[in-house]
Amino acid sequence: MAVLLIVLLPFIGVLLAVASGRLGRRAAAVAAAGPTLVAFALLMSLAPSVLAGEVLVLSRPWVPALGLTFGLRVDGLGFLFALLILGIGLLVIQYAYFYMSRGDPLWRFFSYLMLFMGAMLGVVLSENVLLMALFWEVTSLSSFLLIGYLSDRSAARRGARMALTITGLGGFCLFAGLVILGQIVGSYELTDILASGELIVGHDWYLPMLILVLIGAFTKSAQFPFHFWLPNAMTAPTPVSAYLHSATMVKAGVFLLARLHPALSGGDAWFYLVGGVGMATMFFAAYVAFFRHDLKALLAYSTISHLGLITALFGFGTAGAAVVGIFHIMNHAAFKASLFMTAGIIDHQTGTRDIRILGNLRRAMPYTMVLALLGSAAMAGIPFLNGFLSKELFLKETLTAPMMAGTPWLLPTVATVGAIFSMAYSVRLVHGVFFEPGQGKMPKEGHDPSAGMLLPVAILVAICVVVGVAPQWTAAPLLAAAAQSVVVGELPAYSLTLWHGFTMELLMSAIAIGGGIFVYTQRARLYDLAHRIWPGLTGGAVFEKTVELVVGAGARLTATLENGSLQRYLVLLLVMALAAGALPFIQYGFSSGPQELTPTNPVAIAVWALLVVAALATVLTHRNRITAIICLSVVGLLISIVFVYLSAPDLALTQLSVEVVTILLLLLALFVLPKTAPRESSRLRKGRDIAVAALGGLGMGAISWAVMTRPQDSISDFFLEHATYPVGGGTNVVNVILVDFRGFDTFGEVAVLVLAAFGIYTMLRYANHTFVEGVPDTADDRYPVVLVSASRPLLALILLMSIFIFLRGHYLPGGGFIGGLVASVALIMQYLASGIDWANERMRLNFRVVAVIGFLIAMVAGSVAFVMDLPFLTMALLGMDVPLVGESDFVMTLLFDLGIGLAVVGSTMTILSELSHMQEVEPYDEAQRAKESDPWKP
Amino acid sequence: MNHWIALPILLPFVSAILIEIVGRGRIAVRRGMGLASCLGTIAVGAAMVLLTRHGKVYTYALGDWEAPFGVVLVLDGLSALLVALTGVVSLFCLLYAMNRHDTRGKFFHFFIQMQVAGICGAVLTGDLFSLFVFFEIMLLSSYNLLVYTGDKQSLRAGIHYVILNLTGSVLFLVAIGTLYGVTGTLNMADMALRVSELGAEDIALVRAGALLLTVVFLLKSAILPLYLWLPNVYSSAMAPVAALFAILTKVGVYAILRVSTLIFGPEAGVAADAIEPYLLPLATLTLLLGMTGALGSTHLRKMMGYLIVASLGTMLMAMGLFTETGIASGLYYLPHSTVAIAMLFLLADLIGRQRGPEDDHLVVAHMPKQSGVLGLIFFVGAIAVAGLPPFSGFLGKMWILQASLPAPQVVIIWAVILSTSVMALVAFSRAGSLIFWKGEEPPKGEPPRGDSQMGATAFEFLPVVGLLICIVLYTAFAGPVAEFCTVTAQNLLTPSVYIEAVLGAQR
């Protein structure tokens, strides 16, 4: 349980810090330090058992399907890291309280810091590797927030984005690698993974998995070629650099190498990749660090170099090297955090971090000087400090590294040269700041800071000294426990003593110290040389450029594809449809069915020929809109004739009435549009459109032919059988299908109709009318007398007719839908013949409400069935009879049909009255229109 | 009688009717009815999820006509999931709209309820033709909601939207006609049976019908090359509508999944796997191009539009594997991406309003007034959409990666998913740092521009935070949800379960 609390406490700290927002700096610091202290105490309570070699595992299920558990684990390695995170965390909180300027909202800073702390603890204490990957990414995210903390500086924003992208990328790769790892092992629990080293190394997926995992580790630990984000992350406030970017987060990469060492280190690829990258980074970064003039940049490259050293040690793949790697993790965390804090103190007190400007501070800042001197000495590997011990052991390991039999001199040489530069920059750090005179004027005359700010540094430096002098009594037990979780089987023999006799590694150390001092004395010449030949190419610049390129390319590609042309989208859709329809016929061939063809009838041929002509005419005359609409109406009428010919009177009637109403509405709409459409298609585009249309028509024809020549075995037989009295209740099978068998579809279509009416109403009423240009009314006789006088008596007749059609629908062609349409025609005629004002005065009905009431009646008709516990829209209510009228099904369908009819009338009339409203808008203005962009294009 | 199965359709229909009859001119009544209906949909949806969690399939024969002759509603896990999701998203959109949007025109609540009914009907019906009908209801109500404000940009986007989709409807009818011509039925379960019994002479025709149907669904779910309409349409709609639209494309996904597993699955005889080979490559390219668009977007809402496209690509990639874990992982990802993007749409509105005339354009403007809390929510939302831990997007992507490991295309799938995740990271970190870090201080002394100086009220934050909490809960309860998705995926891959539930009595 303690381990769960340890991980959760920092997150509680986040909430406390946020809550402390208004209470001031001290409250924020307490909110952060309190949970950390408790977690630290809890960790300490686990120390005896962990140091005794126990592994504490706690597992709670989370998503079994993914193999993701909330599993935590405390072993030596996790304990060591948790100790670093919480211990240094406490020191950093103390330091930050003094370091951060008074104006800063400290609660925000601490809430980010605690978020990081919790995530980092999660990484090092996870038992489930997927959970570890989850926490891993959270550390990247919190680091993003912390690097960008000083968000008004563009360097900070850039640095934050760069760090997030690189470490985020690494996190995704790691996570992919771990998924493969888990699939190889069959479990995502570390206990299982660590025990399956042989299985993993021998698996086909070993190499891809390893590469993905290593990308994760290398990006986090800033290994070449992913190192460049770390120097750019130095824009973060110094406490962050000390904590995240030297002591803990960047160690997550090497932690991962240590954690998976037992499972992955067995392969040759491991040695070459990890060892090679580590050595290269160690050497290269030490070299670069020497040339940095910014204190923090120098320390950043030094951190990269030391991380390279640790990486290399794990890369050697031997138990001995791994133990040294862990030892150096501990030592580096101590001295580098102290050095970063020192750099922060210098920056804080003098206002600059430039070594060239800083100088002669030994008198003004004596305490700081002593601490910096000791920290740098530890970093350089001077005896009696902890850095010396692990560096000696590292040099020894390079001498005995495996797989280097051919070139045994290579690794020791690289290591020694790297150590020379390490010595050189360490000397520079102390000498350049505290002893050498500076080249410019410092913004502030520095002096030692308050004790509260020096205390955390002093504690860390004290650790460096104590461990350096008496390692057996201090670091040894912790190291042994941590090493035990990295090494399979017995711990190798290693000796944590200062004096091993006159050995090869002692010679190398001596060369490094001497050589480092020599290099430093030659610094003026080296800087001069570097100034001339330093390559302008840096990882950061390449990264920035790449991101710019990708974003720019994305924007251009998107703008090219999504050009806002409806024509293009439509062509894409139609071509897709053509391809989809044609592909199977190309693959499997086209075959017509076995059905006998009926003999041709000359009348039918004539009708169909007319149909083709009318359709073509619609297309050809489309620029003259009225003509086109008339041609279109011919098409519609011919289709209803075709329905009659094919013995479908109901369809013919429906088609006819729909046709009349739509054409009338179209004509009304045309009234407010220009009479001709502009000529806007290029010849090429027309060609394309003709091709698509022709192919589409041919395709439809082919499919229809194939369908209609096939024998039909469909559910319609059932309808024919059951429609007739008494089962379905009626004799008009079409109507029974509409209101009974498939009443639900009709019900839905009623909703569609009502929606259409409401939509058109909203659009015409509320739309920005610059879209719709009115045209002046040019007709001389507005209301022809013949039409007026004929339409009024016709109104009653047609309405009567519509009621008749409606009522007989159940048994003969007709029904609510057609009835409604016919009634609408009667009403529309009044509008046409006598004008809107005349008609509106006489019809004070809100047709929208009529439509909704129609929908409501249909709903009620369907819901009556609930009373009998029958499904919605059941018409035959257990053979119930309604007095005076007849069987229930007849009554119910009639009610339902009534709803449909009302909805039809209401909807059509809503559209109509809104369209006629349009005529009141301003007249059509050619000049205005020319200014308006084409409504069909953006 | 399982009357409750029809409830997610009838409840919003009834409230839509009452909103127009009882609630005319009384905004409180309209709001109350809208909320009640959404809450009811959530309740029914939740009950449906619970009832179907062991894989049981329920049916409801409308008009008391047994399948395949009447229209049946069929409830399985997939439908239940979408009903519940629709309820949740519509509730928060409605809450958000109550701040200012629902009084900008008439009929807002009517259209929203019709929209909900349309979505629920589409996912519940077991009949291909009534699927068409509900697609029409969805289309018209979404179109009405889109042009609701009546401004030029939304009208223009609306024309694109409605014409493309009406063309799609025509194709839908052609596809239905073809399939009816070959199989003689409209009931999907019955069609599945009849398709599997077809002779070799019908192979081309039935496959043509299947592919035409797929084209329609690809248009609805905005999959390459038919996604180009989406970003502009969604970014033109007002915020709560755009947030609700996040679910519309999922109905397209639903339809693809339903049809490709039930009717044209591996046991479909001559039509076996008619759709299967095309889905994965198209979805992969969609993800790639969608994310490219998000990266290159010039304003935040457009970016969200492209992120929807990308998320659709992601989930259809997973489903396109047509394995149990593939479909299950896609199903898990579906609600996550819907909720996360809906939230970001609402948030983009709040951000845009506080930035003055620059609105949500990704250029330097003054800092949003409430940059602290907006930034925090944006940060969390971005994490969720980009698929970063600790939210459900991460779990979803993790599952998709696991699911695709045995597939032969694993390298491509992994490469695309990982690289697009990094692209999302870049896109969000650029947009976020531009808006919340690079912003200038609001000018002092200058008169406030528009309402940019007014902070959002707590009631405006409520839906955003509510959706955020949904994501957190969805992450925390990922275990049972994942189990539900697995059972549902198993069911989808065993069409006989569905078919027997619908036709069991007869055959």
Image (spheres, coloured by chain):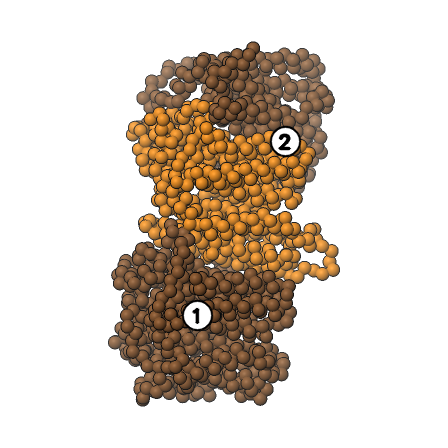
Chain colours: A brown, B orange
Q: Mark 2 points at which residue?
A: B20
Location of residue A352 (image quadrant): bottom right
Q: Where is residue B205 in the image (x, y as percent from the top left)?
A: 36, 30
- Can you say whether A832 is above or below B418 in the image? above
Closer to the camera, A639 or B130? B130
From the viewer's side, name the closer residue of A845 and A282. Answer: A845
Q: Residue A374 carries which label?
A: none
Which residue of the protein is positioned furthest toward the top in this rendering?
A: A884
Residue lying at 35% horizontally and 78% vertically, measured from the top left: A394
Chain containing mark 2:
B
From the viewer's perspective, tell me whether residue B72 is left or right of residue B10.
Answer: left
Alpha carbon distance from label 2 to label 1: 68 Å
Q: Can residue B111 be seen in this view?
A: yes
Q: Is residue B238 above or below residue A599?
A: below
A15 vs B258: above or below: below
- Point out the image quarter for the C terminus of chain A: top right
**Residue B313, position as x, y percentages in the image:** 44, 46
Q: Is A136 or A809 nearer to us in this picture?
A: A136
- Identified by mark 1, the residue type is Ser
Q: Which chain carries label 1?
A: A
SS of the residue under disc 2: helix
Please, what secondary structure does the residue beneath circle 1 have? Answer: helix
Task: Tell me the residue that label 1 is attached to.
Answer: A45
**Amino acid found under the numbered disc labelled 2:** Glu
